[in-house]
């Protein structure tokens, strides 16, 4: 008990207490200064009658899907390639893949703003060099904006998934692969029959990180689009920010925060249940 006390106190002060307080404040009309007025479930009723809330939910879901597909797909592919190809540069590659994670979101977003630029951005320049009469305003077109912003976040934090998958694959016994190789298994079959099944717990953790990360996304759209065009890149956390810190409706913002926490918790429980069922 003595050994877990510091961690328990930290969790209580920094996570549990704020979550409980946010839940309590969600039943009040509160501007952050006064005592607040009891509203009951009015904040939640107002929230679920707001079209922006459902659009933000949809955007957060798209964000989460892009993160899952890109981070886990590319992260797994890079991890398998690095494990398969023995090179003295493997350490450098691991460092390079993880580097964007520790770089400021502002720096990352400014770099991608240049790449997405309509006039001189790299992507439009490539289309022009290939002779395609196609120019895309990636961040102001409502059809592409949410995907463009999601991709930036997925690219920046892919290194976390890569490192976890790489470490998990490195921990698999080489004897299993050697036995499969003797039996004539191809490298694709070895990874399908050995690597993938043994990464089940890692996949579960990576999925939870990616999905909850998508639901909590904020800084990328705040810097790159400000929620625009219109509200087409507005996320749940961005709606929370505008409600609480721009409009000073902290009670309403707390209701949004509670919904985000519940959605993240629900996703975690569903994924845990799904993987547990697969094990049984």
Image (cartoon, grey):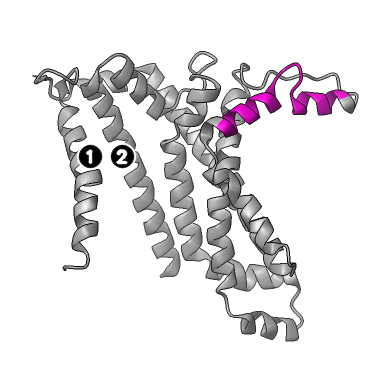
Quadrant of the snapshot with the N terminus: bottom left
Kindly identify the residue that appears in the image at 59 percent across and 63 percent down.
166
Does any portion of residue 201 appear in the rendered image? yes
* Membership of 83 in magenta stretch: no
The answer to whether the residue labelled 1 contacts the one labelled 2, judged by CB atoms less than 8 Å apart, is: yes
Q: Secondary structure at mark 2?
A: helix
Between disc 1 and disc 2, whose residue precedes?
Answer: 1
Kindly identify the residue that appears in the image at 11 percent across and 17 percent down.
34
What stretch of residues is rendered in magenta? Answer: 107-128
Q: Would residue 168 be found to the left or right of residue 137 on screen?
A: left
Q: Secondary structure at mark 1?
A: helix
Vertical side of 205 occupied by 17: above or below: above
Mark 2 surroundings: few (<14), some (14-19) or many (≥20) residues within 10 A: some
Per the model, the C-alpha gap separating discs 1 and 2 is: 8 Å
> Of helix, strand and loop, which mostly describes the magenta segment?
helix
Vertical side of 76 occupied by 258: above or below: above
In the picture, the disc for residue 19 is 1
**Residue that carries the numbered disc 2 in the rendered image:** 261
Kindly identify the residue that appears in the image at 66 percent across and 22 percent down.
138
Front label number (1 vs 2)? 1
Residue 20 coordinates in the image, percent (x, y): 18, 39
Residue 113 coordinates in the image, percent (x, y): 63, 25
Residue 207 coordinates in the image, percent (x, y): 48, 51
């Amino acid at each position: 008990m003595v050994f877990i006390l510091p961690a328990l106190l930290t969790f209580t002060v920094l996570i549990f207490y704020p979550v409980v307080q946010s839940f309590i404040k969600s039943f009040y009309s509160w501007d952050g200064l006064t005592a607040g007025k009891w509203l009951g479930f009015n904040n939640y009723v107002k929230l679920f009658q707001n079209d922006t809330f459902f659009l933000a939910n949809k955007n957060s879901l798209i964000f989460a899907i892009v993160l899952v597909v890109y981070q886990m797909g590319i992260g797994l592919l890079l991890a398998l390639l690095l494990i398969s190809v023995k090179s003295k540069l493997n350490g450098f590659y691991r460092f390079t893949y993880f580097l964007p994670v520790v770089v400021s979101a502002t720096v990352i977003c400014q770099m991608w703003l240049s790449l997405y630029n309509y006039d001189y951005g790299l992507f439009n320049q490539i289309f022009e060099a290939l002779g395609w009469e196609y120019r895309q305003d990636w961040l102001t077109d409502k059809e592409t904006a949410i995907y463009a912003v999601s991709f930036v976040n997925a690219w920046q934090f892919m290194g976390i998934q890569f490192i976890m998958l790489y470490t998990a694959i490195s921990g698999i016994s080489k004897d299993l692969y050697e036995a499969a190789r003797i039996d004539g298994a191809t490298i694709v079959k070895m990874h399908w029959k050995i690597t993938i099944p043994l990464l089940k717990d890692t996949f579960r953790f990576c999925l939870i990180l990616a999905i909850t990360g998508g639901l909590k996304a904020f800084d990328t759209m705040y810097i790159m689009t400000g929620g625009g065009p219109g509200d087409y890149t507005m996320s749940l956390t961005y709606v929370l920010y505008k409600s609480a810190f721009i409009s000073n409706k902290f009670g309403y913002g707390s209701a949004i925060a509670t919904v985000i926490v519940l959605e993240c918790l629900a996703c975690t429980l569903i994924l845990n249940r799904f993987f547990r069922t697969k094990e049984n």
